[in-house]
Amino acid sequence: MHRYGQPTSVIYNSIGVIKTPYVGKAPYQPVETGSGEFYLEIDEPYVEGLKGLDSFSYIYVLYFIDRVTGPARMTVTPPWSDGRAVGLFASRSPERPNPIGLSIVRLKKIIGNRVYTSGLDVFDNTPLLDIKPYIKDLDSKPDADYGWVEDADENQHLALHIQGIPHEH
Ligand SMILES: C[S@@+](CC[C@H](N)C(=O)[O-])C[C@H]1O[C@@H](n2cnc3c(N)ncnc32)[C@H](O)[C@@H]1O
């Protein structure tokens, strides 16, 4: 049981790995049209759990951002924020107390233990923690906004970064 000020330790085991073309450098958010092959390679004990997943066009991919080097600071300046400092939990920084990454990607096909997706924003061999279906209406929030990004200069430029859309600077 969690008590205030006393962290609860949690041990998760990865269920596979994420295969991408990226070594040491990856987009800040998924680029749907990212070139190269992207797939989730599921470990054998979990393959049965993929049944029915291919009926969905989008999935949530959760993973352990295993190669973070920096400490988790409670105030961060996202690389695309034009110098603006915000709280860690108002950001998508990979340097977090629990470096869990979340990406929503298009599910292309499933062959055996491989779940092929559109572009992901992680390094090759990132440990996979979970997959969940993205369900229309349940998961989409038409009244969602840009939060603090709306107040920042060059709002449209930032939105491109957030969405992982390639563009000229
Ligand atoms: C900003 S994070 C966003 C991750 C996810 N979309 C999210 O919002 O939780 C993406 C960045 O994390 C870094 N990254 C990706 N995979 C990583 C890994 N396995 N270990 C350490 N850093 C990683 C890359 O620099 C990439 O640009």
Image (spheres, rainbow, N blue to C red):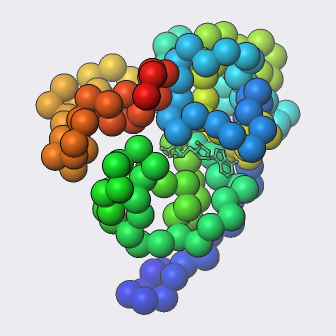
* Percent x, y of residue 83: 35, 56
- Res. 148 visible in picture: yes
Left or right, 107 with respect to 164, comes to right
How many numbered marks are there?
Answer: 0
Q: Nearer the viewer, residue 93 or 131?
A: 93
* Percent x, y of residue 105: 52, 24
User: Residue 113 occupies which quadrant of the picture?
Assistant: top right
Quarter of the picture containing the C terminus is: top left
Residue at 74%, 33% in the rendered image: 22
Can you say whether 71 is above or below 149 in the image?
below
Left or right, 160 with respect to 8, comes to left
Left or right, 27 with respect to 81, comes to right
Q: Nearer the viewer, residue 42 or 80?
A: 80
Can you say whether 11 is above or below 8 in the image?
above
- Res. 48 visible in picture: no
* Percent x, y of residue 2: 45, 81
User: Residue 77 occupies which quadrant of the picture?
Assistant: bottom left
Q: Nearer the viewer, residue 38 or 157?
A: 157
Residue at 54%, 78% in the rendered image: 8
* Percent x, y of residue 120: 61, 29
Can you say whether 30 is above or below 87 in the image?
above
Residue at 57%, 43% in the rendered image: 62
Residue at 63%, 46% in the rendered image: 63
